[in-house]
Every structure is written in structure tokens, then in C-alpha cells.
Amino acid sequence: MEVAEAALKAGAAMINDVTGLERDDKLAGVAGRAGVPVVLVSNQRERPGNYDIMAEVISSLERSIGLALEKGVATQNIIVNPGIGFGKSPRQNLTLIHRLAELKVLGKPILLGTSRKFMTGQVPDRRLEATSATVAIGIAHGVDMVRVHDVGQMVPLCRMSDAIIREKTG
């Protein structure tokens, strides 16, 4: 909470909570008082078994949204992130990317953060191409925002993907 407050004082424009407020719901109060967006990341503990990972992610994000609203975050300031790479197996991560459109049921903007993640490639200097694929597919499945490291390479990819998917010509 102290880090978030200091970051906001230093000019940060949003709070990104990789625990979906499960560890410290006071972060939501900080965001609510500051009137800034909060990104709620679904962060499961990887567990064996056969279960519907998307249903679990949606359920965890619904809980996080409820906590954010209770603590005063304005509904328009809530952004959801399925948490690719956060406590999920490689197969579950791929399933989530394939089913991203299902997150629209939450009625919140979706942020996708797959940049340079281990699941996109074993060799760190070869992850750009894999990140590009996940970003383009994310846009095709309706994500509203992406978090990337290689901004110069991703901006044209995002603009072209968005233009193709949404038929923008001007």
C-alpha cells in the first residue's frame, strides 16, 4: 500500500495489483481515494487436475471487482487482467488466450500482459515473435489494452491488428 501511495505521489496514473486485491484490499481504497484506475490480475496457484481455468479466472476477477467496488473504486476505473503466467500451467495460459473473449462477461476493459513471459518462449531473446502472436490474437479476441516491453515493435502490430479486426481505415 505504501508503495502504491508513493508511486501515485510521484505521478503514477494507475495501480496494478498482481494479487487481485486478495493480499491487500487496502490498495483498492488507495485507488478509490486517488480516483485512478486499478488493474485486477487473476493470480491462481497452479494446481493439478482437470478444471475449467476460464471459469476460475472469471470467478476470481468477480471477487476482485466486488472488493474494489466495496473500497470505493469507481466502476469505470476497474480493469481486469486474466493473469497469464501467474500461477497457471503453460496449457492453461494457452487456453486463456484462446478464450479471452469470454472475459467480456465481466463488463470491464481487459488488459493482456504476455510480453516476454516464459510461456511465450524458452529463450529470452526469441520471445518477441511469440509475444507478437499473443498480442495479435488477444486483439482479435477483444482485449482493450496490452502491456508490452518492446513498445516500438508492438505499436505497429497493435494498430494493424486493431484495424484488421475492427475494420478501421482512417
Image (cartoon, rainbow, N blue to C red):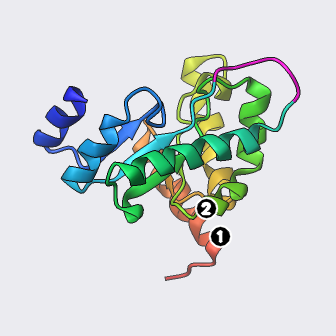
Q: How dense is the environment of label 2, judged by Cα within 10 Å: few (below 14), some, or many (20 and up)? A: some
Q: Amino acid at mark 1?
A: Ile
Q: Is residue 166 left or right of residue 38?
A: right
Quarter assignment of residue 36: bottom left
Q: Which residues are magenta?
A: 45-50
Name the residue rendered at 69%, 51% in the picture: 100
Residue at the farthest right position:
50
Tell me the SS state at disc 2: helix
Q: Is residue 57 left or right of residue 150?
A: right
Front residue of this view, candidates 165 and 46: 46
Front residue of this view, candidates 143 and 131: 143
Q: Which residue is mark 1?
A: 164
**Is residue 133 in sight in this rendering?**
no
Q: Is residue 47 left or right of residue 105?
A: right
Q: Amino acid at mark 2?
A: Ser
- Is 49 included in the stretch rendered in magenta? yes
Quarter assignment of residue 102: bottom right
Label the magenta part by its dominant secondary structure: loop
Q: Which residue is mark 2?
A: 161
Q: Answer whether labels 1 and 2 touch (C-beta < 8 Å).
A: yes
Residue at the farthest bottom position:
170
Residue at the farthest front position:
70
Percent position (x, y) of residue 71?
34, 48
Q: Is residue 168 left or right of residue 137?
A: left
Percent position (x, y) of residue 135?
60, 48
- Quarter holding the N terminus? top left
Percent position (x, y) of residue 110?
54, 54
Front residue of this view, candidates 87 and 152: 87
Name the residue rendered at 54%, 29% in the picture: 116
